[in-house]
Structure formats: C-alpha cells, structure tokens
Image (tube, rainbow, N blue to C red):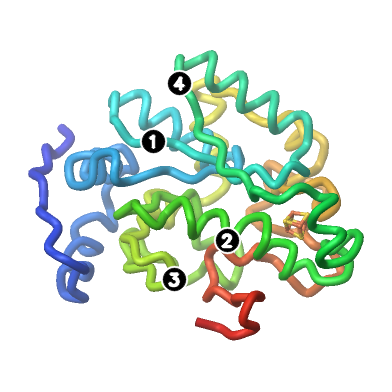
Amino acid sequence: MEQVLSPILLEGEFSKDRIDQLNDRFETSDPGTILRWVDNTFGTDAALGTGFGSSGVFLIDQIQKYQLNIPIFYLDTQLLFDTTYELRDTIEQKYGISIYRVSAGMSFREQAIRYGEELWKTNPNHCCYLRKVRPLRNYLSDKKAWITGIRRSQSKERKQARIIEWNEEHEVIKVNPVADWTGEKIWDHIHHLDLPYNPMHDEGYPSIGCIPCTQPTGDAKESDSRTGRWNGKGKTECGIHLPIQDFETNKEH
Ligand code: SF4
C-alpha cells in the first residue's frame, strides 16, 4: 500500500539535514509517492518542467493519475520540432489540461540583430541562456519547487542527481522523482500505460530538443543517453541543470 504523506511546512530554505532525510525516505519510493509529497508540501508553488521527452510524458501521467494540482510548463524556444508541439496538444487533449508555455520573450530576428545570426552555431551556450536558462529563471522566481525528469543514467553531468536537492541557481527545491530510473524502465511504463510519445524516438532520436541542435543516433528507445544533442560542440546540457553563466554580465553566479 502506498504511504500517505503529511505536509511539511516550509520555513525558509530546507536545511541540508532535512534534505538528507528526505532523500533517505524517498530513495526507494515510486515517483507517484514523491509527486504526492510535492503536491502536499508545495501545491501550486511547485511546477513540473518538461521538454516532452520520455520521463516528462511519464511524470505528466503520474500527476494526472493522482489528480495533483502541480502546474506543468515547457520552455518554448520557438525552435522545437512540429512533433513536439503536436505531442503537447495530444497530451493537453488526453488529460484536459493546459501546459504553460514559458517563452524566451525575444524573437529570432531580435536575437540575430543583437547577438548575430544562428547563435546556436557560434555560441550555443549563449543561445541556450537566452532561450532557456533566463526564461526558466524568470518563471521559477515565484516558485518554491521545480520538478524535473532527469535521470542519473542519462549523462555524467546527471550521475550525481538526488531525488531532492536545493537548487542554488533558482532558489527552489529541485525534485527529480525518476533520478534512479533507467531509460528502459521509463519506456516499459510508457508502453504498458499506452502513453503518447514523440514519434521521432522511433526514428533514432534518443533526446529531442531544438531543431538545429538535435540529431538522430540510432537505437533511440534503447539508448539512455543525451547523445545527438549539440553534436560536435562538446555540450550535452542546455544549462538549466548547471551553474548559471550570466551572459549579461559575463560572470558565473
Ligand atoms: S538547444 Fe540550440 S537552438 Fe535551442 S536554445 Fe540551445 S543552442 Fe539555441
């Protein structure tokens, strides 16, 4: 039987000890239990961010299954594949929900004038900062918890991900309910539950982001990696899960 969790009141930042205790408690919990704790603790002050990948699709389904009030959002760089927008529409229709669009707030024309054409080629970190990191920071500025679909098996940068973390960059509790899951386990659940997913995964794309920075690699659904993103750029993260490099002041903070 699933455990019923009582609310924990937020009093400023979570202490390190509190976070350690929560990780001990949740390390073997199923994602639904963790999401129900988030809902109980933070309510609509939490939000799930998704790029409509396999983990995101599964977590959205868990939020609906338990009828939680957690808002769901995505970062719209305006360079997503049509299949990604179609999947968003399919999910919204299936569950009768609205997924909040967080926009970069700057057109590509404006970006090209200010920073040069095709910034994703010349400086992808700057492009990701403008179109993903900064909009996320703005969106999370009035949130207390941020739920993500990252998994330890995806990349070396994600290997240390904990279920519950304090995220200094955005000053929120970061919750990774499937941190210990493999890609195979996620896909088993997607097929078992007959969930919608991006058909590009069947065409060799393990990880799907912006059009210029996403390539196919082969065994997409078997792969557990972020290969195929920013090929040849020495980059596997857009930056939202890394220390923020602020291109406005050219400092890390
Ligand atoms: S993934 Fe590519 S196009 Fe998208 S924001 Fe990052 S650099 Fe720009």
Q: Which residue is mark 3?
A: 169
Residue 175, percent from left and from top: 36, 55
Name the residue located 48 percent from the left edge and 22 percent from the top edge: 193
Mark 1 is on which residue type?
Answer: Pro
Does label 3 or label 4 sit earlier along the sequence? 4
Mark 2 C-beta closer than 8 Å to ligand 1: no
Image quarter hosting the N terminus: top left
Gap between marks 2 and 1 measured at Cα: 19 Å
Gap between marks 4 and 1 measured at Cα: 9 Å
Gap between marks 2 and 4 measured at Cα: 25 Å
Residue 118, percent from left and from top: 89, 59
Q: Nearer the viewer, residue 113 or 161?
A: 113
Mark 4 is on which residue type?
Answer: Ile
Name the residue located 35 percent from the left edge and 53 percent from the top edge: 142
Gap between marks 2 and 3 measured at Cα: 11 Å
Nearer to us of marks 2 and 1 is 2
Residue 122, percent from left and from top: 88, 70
Name the residue located 65 percent from the left edge and 26 percent from the top edge: 87
Q: Which residue is mark 4?
A: 97
Q: Which residue is mark 1?
A: 71
Q: Secondary structure at mark 4?
A: loop
Mark 3 C-beta closer than 8 Å to ligand 1: no
Nearer to us of marks 2 and 3 is 2
Mark 2 is on which residue type?
Answer: Arg
Mark 3 is on which residue type?
Answer: Glu
Residue 54: quadrant of the picture: top right
- Vertical relation: 236 (above or below) 214: below
- Label 3 neighbourhood size at 10 Å, few (<14), some (14-19), many (20+)? some
- Label 1 neighbourhood size at 10 Å, few (<14), some (14-19), many (20+)? many
Q: Secondary structure at mark 2?
A: helix
